Amino acid sequence: MITMLQDLIRHQGHANASLLRAIRQHEAAAQDLELRRLMHHILLANRFWLALTLGQPFALESESQAPESLDTLAGRFQETHTQELAWILGVQEPELARRIETPFLPGSSFSVEEAWMQVCMHSHGHRSQCATRLWMLGGTPPSLDFILWLKDRPAPDWS
């Protein structure tokens, strides 16, 4: 399962970077508050689960403040992806079975493996919403399919 999670997290970084680049390239999309809000929501969730997995504090109030610019948001995505990748490339199988609890779902616990499937699936769903919004604004969404990414496995292009 580690190999699959590594691939999903690598793909997630590529897909987030590609979508952010496409949004930046279309003026109406780059100025769209709904797109920035949705992208920030993806980032917020990723950062929450990463902090929970690593046993680090999560400053919900400050993390919930959406960045003022798309460039700042993209920088935070890049930073978060770097941290996620460092973690997943060093994790061992027993760590994936460890149980974690979130204050947002009291009385429930999840394996680290389940939490990271949630991270990948959650971001995928919201990227689909963002791609639709970009298209509705007249932009061209990038191809975000995992199966197409597998062909060449491109690294994220954060430019």
Image: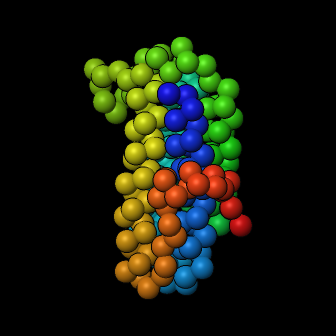
Picture residue at 39% right of the left edge, 47% below the top: 122
Which residue is at the far right? 159
Picture residue at 39% right of the left edge, 73% below the top: 133
Quarter containing the C terminus: bottom right
Residue 110 falls in image quadrant? top left
Report the number of numbered marks: 0
**Is the residue 91 above or below the residue 36 in the image?**
above
Residue 91 falls in image quadrant? top right
**Toward the viewer: 117 or 58?**
117
Picture residue at 46% right of the left edge, 27% below the top: 113
Tell me where residue 47 appears, x and y as whole percent.
Answer: 54, 42
**Toward the viewer: 99 or 71?**
99
Which residue is at the far left? 107
Color encoding of the figure: rainbow
Tell me where residue 96 appears, x and y as whole percent.
Answer: 50, 21
**Toward the viewer: 67 or 20?**
20
Tell me where residue 147 appears, x and y as whole percent.
Answer: 48, 53
**Is the residue 137 above or below the residue 126 in the image?**
below
Residue 69 visible (yes or no): no
Residue 26 falls in image quadrant? bottom right
Is residue 108 toward the left or the right of residue 157 in the image?
A: left
Tell me where residue 92 appears, x and y as whole percent.
Answer: 61, 19
Residue 19 visible (yes or no): yes
**Is the residue 63 above or below the residue 110 in the image?**
below
Picture residue at 43% right of the left edge, 31% below the top: 115
**Is the residue 152 above or below the residue 139 in the image?**
above
Which residue is at the far front? 151
Is residue 112 toward the left or the right of residue 87 in the image?
A: left
